Image: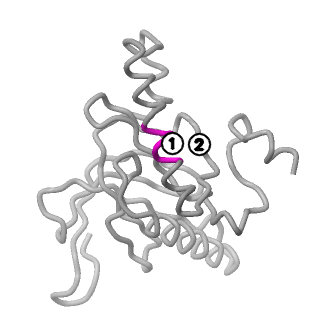
Amino acid sequence: MYIGAGDRGYRLTRRKDIAEQRNSSVWQADHSGMPDQIIVVKIIKTTGSKERDAIQATEAWIHEKEVHSSLGDHSAILRMLGSDARFHSIYTEHVDAQSLLCQRHRVSDHFSGNADAQRILADMASALYFIHRNSIVHNDIKQGNILYSPGRGAVLIDFGLSFRDSNPSSGGGTPWYLPPEFLRN
């Protein structure tokens, strides 16, 4: 797919689907402006045919893009590489790892030892400390939003439900993983 006009455009080549959900589509791609690197493309979808649906998709894209791009670099947080308003797309690094949810369904259904669990805990504690220090609440910590490989460690992904600490959302998160104080409010 060629995007843009004249020499200032770029080409995306879709490699492999990662996830297809009601509100988003996520896939691996090659980006002509980032050669020798696989990226991940997340497209925020318009879920209906009304103008209101298009506005909501645009607002969701702006929100996720602004929060994610404000974080800066941390080894346990998925790095954002860019975005494109024309397609409500966000481009991130590709991490060669599975989510903890996928790893849970392996044949052994557990990690190979305490070292994996300790690494995940340390990486996620560090990532959460980092984002909270930047006044961001992730708001959707769950197995599906943590990638893990022994080489890279644990990586926090998906900032779609996150919010600035001074601006809590009216709802969101995955019910089984919501903190008790969120449920009380």
Marks 1 and 2 in Cβ contact (< 8 Å): yes
Quadrant of the image containing the N terminus: bottom left
With respect to residue 29, does 153 lie above or below? above
Classify mark 2: helix, strand or loop.
loop
Residue 172 in the image: state x and y as whole percent: 71, 53
Q: Which residue is mark 2?
A: 141
- Few, some or many residues within 10 Å of mark 2 (<14, 14–19, 20+): many
Residue 2 location, x and y as percent?
A: 24, 75
Residue 42 to residue 59: above or below? above
The region drawn magenta spans: 123-128
Q: Nearer the viewer, residue 48 or 99?
A: 99
Q: Is residue 176 left or right of residue 90?
A: right
Residue position for label 1: 145
User: Could you say which is closer to the camera, residue 1 or residue 103?
Assistant: 103
Residue at 83% x, 44% y is: 183
Q: Which amino acid type is marked by label 2?
A: Ile
As rendered, which of 157 and 22 lies closer to the eye? 157
Q: Is residue 127 magenta?
A: yes
Which residue is rendered at x = 37% and y = 53% of the image? 74
> Considering depth in this image, is 33 or 18 the residue closer to the camera?
33
Residue 109 percent coordinates (x, y): 47, 13
